Image (cartoon, rainbow, N blue to C red):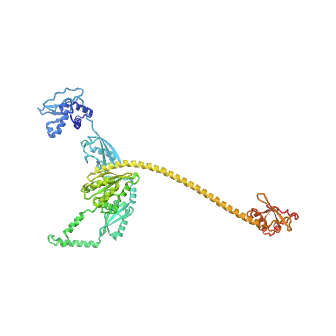
Amino acid sequence: MASNMDREMILADFQACTGIENIDEAITLLEQNNWDLVPSAIFDNSWVVLCFMTMTLLESTDQAAINGVIPQENGILQSDYGGETIPGPAFDPSHPASVPAPSSSSAFRPVMPSRQIVERQPRMLDFRVEYRDRNVDVVLEDSCTVGEIKQILENELQIPVSKMLLKGWKTGDVEDSTVLKSLHLPKNNSLYVLTPDLPPPSSSSHAGALQESLNQNFMLIITHREVQREYNLNFSGSSTIQEVKRNVYDLTSIPVRHQLWEGWPTSATDDSMCLAESGLSYPCHRLTVGRRASPAQTREQSEEQSTDVHMVSDSDGDDFEDASEFGVDDGEVFGMTSSALRKSPMMPENAENEGDALLQFTAEFSSRYGDCHPVFFIGSLEAAFQEAFYVKARDRKLLAIYLHHDESVLTNVFCSQMLCAESIVSYLSQNFITWAWDLTKDANRARFLTMCNRHFGSVVAQTIRTQKTDQFPLFLIIMGKRSSNEVLNVIQGNTTVDELMMRLMAAMEIFTAQQQEDIKDEDEREARENVKREQDEAYRLSLEADRAKREAHEREMAEQFRLEQIRKEQEEEREAIRLSLEQALPPEPKEENAEPVSKLRIRTPSGEFLERRFLASNKLQIVFDFVASKGFPWDEFKLLSTFPRRDMKQPRYREEKKLDRGLGKPKDTKSRNAWPKFT
């Protein structure tokens, strides 16, 4: 009996030879023959012995020998004995033929099949092709070619086939003429399209992009050639090239007209052009400035060169044996050569400011590998966390940490061919915040391990610590979570562009799923906070309304109290005046008096009457004082006579010194009560 693994191999070989797709049927036939593939045991009643034996022979012998032993043409197998030909049997299921015994003259004598052979259906392959933000599903037979997939994608994506790179094949890059069957692909496949020759789509209009560039700050690293000094200057995108040159004049004392520049983009043709339009690299760009030689200096140099040439030409062909006569030393020559070939460090050792260290890293990376590289974040690792993770969920990105090592043999290849590939640069710029660090120096390595231990834990720090030099550079993919930072992937330098892209896309899929959950939670939290904020605002307004009512009531009560106090004071004052007037009145004369007496009857506004006797010689003011002592001050009331009606407050009456002159003589001198009445 065959083992399970042998049975799987036998079943696969049997299905491949016979074309039987039904596994149960194939297993039934094999079990009837005790899983024995010997033709005499299993193929006595089957026409497929010819196919099986031919495949077996093709696998075990050379193709040329097979062609000599088993020439096959037009469905006829030729025997080696006497040139006898054995025609291939025609299949007719309605007339089964008797099966003759196998002849010893040929081991490949076919027999009539006892069952109908099911024609093998073509195998269909499913492809999901990703291009930027689109997914295209393609279904083809395995007999089609790669070029046919591209033609379908050309119609769907409107991208010419010549501009299209179809990536994601497990066997590496393939030609357009490659047949899919030869790639041994599974049924479901995932591919992606790269278009390095086409510009990436802009997310906004040109005016919007220009406005965004105008608001950005450019770091210009300007090297003064003569003194070998660097200046790090920050300019806004709206600054002009002329302003940069004027600022450099203030630093170097080189007038603008004498400045000789290197490093400006080819599009920077006018000094009035702003930096946002000049094509400078963002966020930093390196420039070199020197003093332009004057015409006199140029003439002197030309004369010196001609003199040197004349001296050499007068040597009469003598060998230049003694170079020391011209002050040239071999050690100096080789020293200069080795110094020129020696690379500048990517990052200064023991850098105090991480931002300055990354500025130098970016500048040195650009000088080595060109301007087409990921935009490295300028700032500390904590600032990169803030930029990537601690923002709204919709604005979050993955953090990619690039760890550089100059002593690794993989560094140059990884940086130039993979990290600077346009597809990688574009994908990183859209979906990642990229931060870099150089581990070449021991001090910088120890500093990063400390940061790594603090932010990611000791396990990640130990993993990086145990990496060998030749395993660098490393690419760490970090995803921020609610309470911690998770390292999704650690990519070593021994990889390819396709593999790097696939791993970045896989990390992006994990991040996108987590981001959708965070967006949902954040929206729910914002909704709750909005409701709470509205409730707090309504409560605050109600408190303010209650406080306003209380303050208005308090003001009203205070005003009432003040008016009451004023009224009381006025009443007290009037009462005091009344009492003083009452006390100042002369005593009322008796009816029987030697002097004439007048009895006055005064009606008040309420209808009551006031009566009193006065001496005729009394002043009229005494009458006013009497009325005022009864609560009717003369400045508030009028004193009128009934007949004739006169206002006694008029000055001509008030100035009378005696009562009888002011009021007039009584009509009846005998009756002292016959004076007019007053109201």
Q: Can residue 366 be seen in this view?
A: no
x%, y% of residue 227? 30, 69
x%, y% of residue 277? 36, 60
- Label total for image: 0
Image quarter of the C terminus: bottom right
Residue 74 position by quadrant? top left
Image quarter of the N terminus: top left
x%, y% of residue 499? 28, 49
Which residue in the rendered view is the most extreme toward the right? 670
- Residue toward you, 432 or 114: 432
Residue 127 position by quadrant? top left
- Residue toward you, 62 or 186: 186
Q: Using the image, determine if residue 264 lies above or below residue 87.
A: below
- Residue toward you, 247 or 458: 458
Residue 305 position by quadrant? bottom left
x%, y% of residue 211? 40, 58
Q: Is residue 328 left or right of residue 209?
A: left
Q: In this view, does 587 lie to the left or right of 490?
A: right
- Residue toward you, 408 or 626: 626
Q: Is residue 123 visible?
A: yes
